[in-house]
Amino acid sequence: MRKPFTPHRKLPKNCIPESYPLPPTPYPLPPTPMTQIELHNIVKTYPRQALPAAAEVSLHVASGTLVAMLGPSGSGKSTLLKLIAGVELPDNGDIRLDGQSVLDVPAHKRGAVLMFQKAYLFPFLSVAENIAFGLKVQGVSQATQHAEVRRMLELVELPGCERKRPAQLSGGEQQRVALARALVIQPRVLLLDEPFSSLDPTVRQTLQEAVRRIQRERGITTLLVTHDRSEALAMADQVALLDRGELLACAPPQRLFARPPTRRAARLMGVTTFLRGELAGGQLRTGLGTLTVCTEGVPPGQATYAIRPEHLRLGGAPGPNTLPARILSQTFRGEQHEYQAQVGDATIRVWAFQPLDAPIGAQVFVQFPPEHLFAVDDDEPEGRHKHA
């Protein structure tokens, strides 16, 4: 029979993965505490980088919620996680957990656990020993360790894998073990830095659902970094949009998807068509033509409206709120057909569930339903206005 892991088995120096800060308080712990996170005007810059990684970012994460930080590479998402975890310090601003500043609190005492794209499991330890590692550091009894390992394996749906080594697990299973190792010490805050990005789509979705279920059951305040819009929308209570170190918006996913407040936020939400013109009497006069729009809350004068590609409609005949167009390309994407169409001197993208009976180069009409046109604050330079 294989010997259990005991303290006299020495670990190599520097063997603790950077993704695994030591637990903050002695075991046993009460149920996971509800912890709120507050970022106040956080500024972080790096040498030889033109733009700041964080430019006066203020964000509130309510206790027990999951907030997804969505944005392109280099937008500052991972930097914010490191600042919250205490791996790095901000140049300016404050970070508070439950109203208390933690700027002077070392990383291992903040109660935050980081999970990365890679699981960072100890290859020479079994699954059970990997999960129990934090408890062992805390001096928890072996009986309690065994009970907690079994409980965690049930939680992440890997019962019976105690004796396996990481090399015997799939990528998704390794991430489940990493999640169990993070949760067993009952952290105040769970920080996820694209933990699903290297997994195949089926495993990714399964693990997303598992993390969301566990997060809700245990009420762990969680921040998820992702560049995958569908992942953010599916998992989050709130989605925070970041770009070039700036926080553009933070709102529930359904609201942010339907009505992003600015042009840059709309792009991150998949909006590709923007119309800028003079608004008067419910009409938007643009260089492409005049369209009827909803003007509630929008003052007359220069205005920018947006519309999602799935809300545009292609047809062979003119109608209400239509503009003439020419089909440039068609791409079949499984559930939908994607068209590129030229309207005046602009190129727009249209998604259709049924193919249009018209060849490439055909003259058609694009309809802009007024109920789907919404105003946005224009926060982009003029050079990006023509092409989505």
Image (spheres, rainbow, N blue to C red):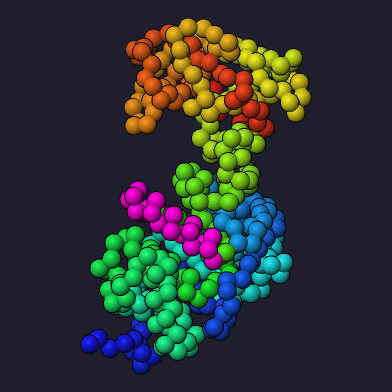
Measured as percent of width and height from the top left, residue 59 is found at: 66, 54
Q: Nearer the viewer, residue 43 or 51?
A: 43
Q: Which residues are magenta?
A: 197-218
As drawn, 183 above or below 238: below
Check residue 214 for magenta coloring: yes
Residue 150 seen in render: yes
Check residue 65 for magenta coloring: no
**Occupied quadrant, residue 257:** top right
Q: Nearer the viewer, residue 151 or 255?
A: 151
On the picture, is 219 further left or further right than 5? right
Residue plotted at (42% across, 74% down): 151
Q: Nearer the viewer, residue 127 or 123?
A: 127
Main SS class of the magenta portion in the image = helix
Measured as percent of width and height from the top left, residue 161 is found at: 30, 72
Residue 244 seen in render: no
**Occupied quadrant, residue 382:** top right
